[in-house]
Image (spheres, rainbow, N blue to C red):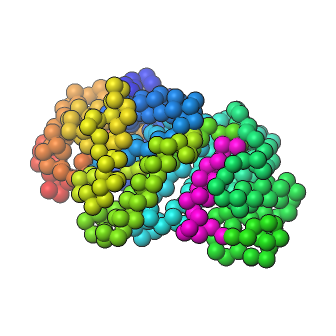
Amino acid sequence: MDISYAEMLSLNRIQASSILNCMGETGQPPEYGLEFITVGIDRYLYIVEHEYLERLIKKAKGSAFRLVQGSYGCGKTHFLYCVRSLAQRLGFLTCTVNLSPKECPYEDTVKVYQAIFDNIACKLPAEHLDEGSGRLKDTVYGFSDILRLFAKGELKTENPGVSFSEVSVENYAFRTACCEFVKACREGREEDEELLEYWLSGSAQVSAEGLRRLGIFESISYDNAFPAMRSLISMVSAMGFPGVVFLFDEVDLHTSGASKKHLRAMGDNLRRLIDLCASSAMPGVMFFYAVPPEFINFDITVYPALQQRLITPLAMSKSSPQSVVIDLEKISVESRDFLYALGKRLMMISAKAWDWSPHESEVMAENLRRFVEFTEEHVFTGGYRLFVKFWIAILFEQYGGGIKALSEDNFAELLQL
């Protein structure tokens, strides 16, 4: 994915500034414009797109699970965002969920279901947008709003499926709620629509009497949240989407402090998910689950059944795409070329954002080379993220004060080492 300066010209000044602001503040990848700063993961993205999303999931209606491994700051979130862009371009719904032991622990099936319900997203191609609707955003978030688009005939999917009432599901109450929700939307019954939305969201604060009137006699709970999620996937397929790509990111997994009970429950749910994908019990679905290296190296050793499913002899490659683990640490091992290429991309973006030409300066090229070497030698955790934040700070300083050669002492002072 070698993008030239000429291709960078497709970025406008506002977009370029937005990328630099986002990455300069947090080191996190931007929501949009990922293609301009993506380096080193091309081989993984190629396999995900062609071997899985296009062939296995979209054409064969299979399913797959992949564990994304990488230390803090090495680019797990960036990778997930790239996968999301690929999936959306191919017409898939996507669902990004940030998991954490307190806010949304993976072993709490109700909270995970609620997060999926809220975050499942439908990207609408520009040619499919209804100009008369006045809708400005091209991405719709939340299962209920996607259902509303379907009810109003505003979803222009490639292959609309069967009637909702004929969809094979595990949770019949979920199917009934979807059918009644669509009817309420079409008939303008706002109170019923709101009541059903609360039930579908997993809320406990729902009128039991109102639900019985609509033919629903149970609620979404710990016991049936997983079947409800699989039923949601079945309804998505019935709308004509090729499937759903789930992106789970363990953003605050302090594994060293996690209890054995927590790890056991988490491991049990992951094992069940992997087995469901392996048996194609959830057609048209791919799961990506991002964790720190400690999860595989230490935590799953207490759960041999999960360990056996995740440990594979070969790394993912074009000749061996079946590997369950995508190891981003292997990119970091060859970090010098990776960081240098990323630094050049950021220089070209800053040229567009600030109207200058650092990418043409031999002094800036040498500054970048020295900063890459300094980062490799002195930054041991969060290297990718810290490199991005401080290289953008260096670019801004050079832009404002004029280009000049920098030494290791300058870098040490900047990083407060």
Instruction: Tell me the residue at 53%/30% (across/down).
Output: 54
- The residue closer to the viewer here, 372 or 237, is 237
In the image, residue 62 above or below residue 304: above
Residue 139 pos. (x, y %):
62, 46
Give the residue drawn at x 26%, y 43%: 329
x and y, in percent, of residue 274 in the image: 44, 49
In the figure, 270 relative to 278: above or below? Answer: below
Q: Quadrant of the N terminus?
A: top left
Q: Is residue 373 left or right of residue 126?
A: left
Image height of 370 relative to 165, above or below: above
Residue situated in front as seen by the camera: 348 or 284: 284
Q: Describe residue 70's horizontal placement relative to residue 370 as left or right.
A: right
Residue 302 position in % (x across, y down): 27, 61
Relative placement, left or right, of 28 versus 387 is right
Give me the residue at 57% from left, 40% from top: 284
Q: Is residue 218 magenta?
A: no
Residue extent of the magenta highlight:
219-238
Prevailing SS of the magenta stretch: helix
Image quadrant of residue 188? Answer: bottom right
x 41%, y 60%: residue: 268
Q: Is residue 220 magenta?
A: yes
* Residue 28 showing in the rendered view: no
Q: Looking at the rendering, which quadrant does residue 388 occupy?
A: top left
151 sits left or right of 44 in the view: right
Front residue of 35 and 331: 331
Which quadrant, please, contains the C terminus?
A: bottom left
Residue 198 horizontal/vertical position (percent): 69, 67
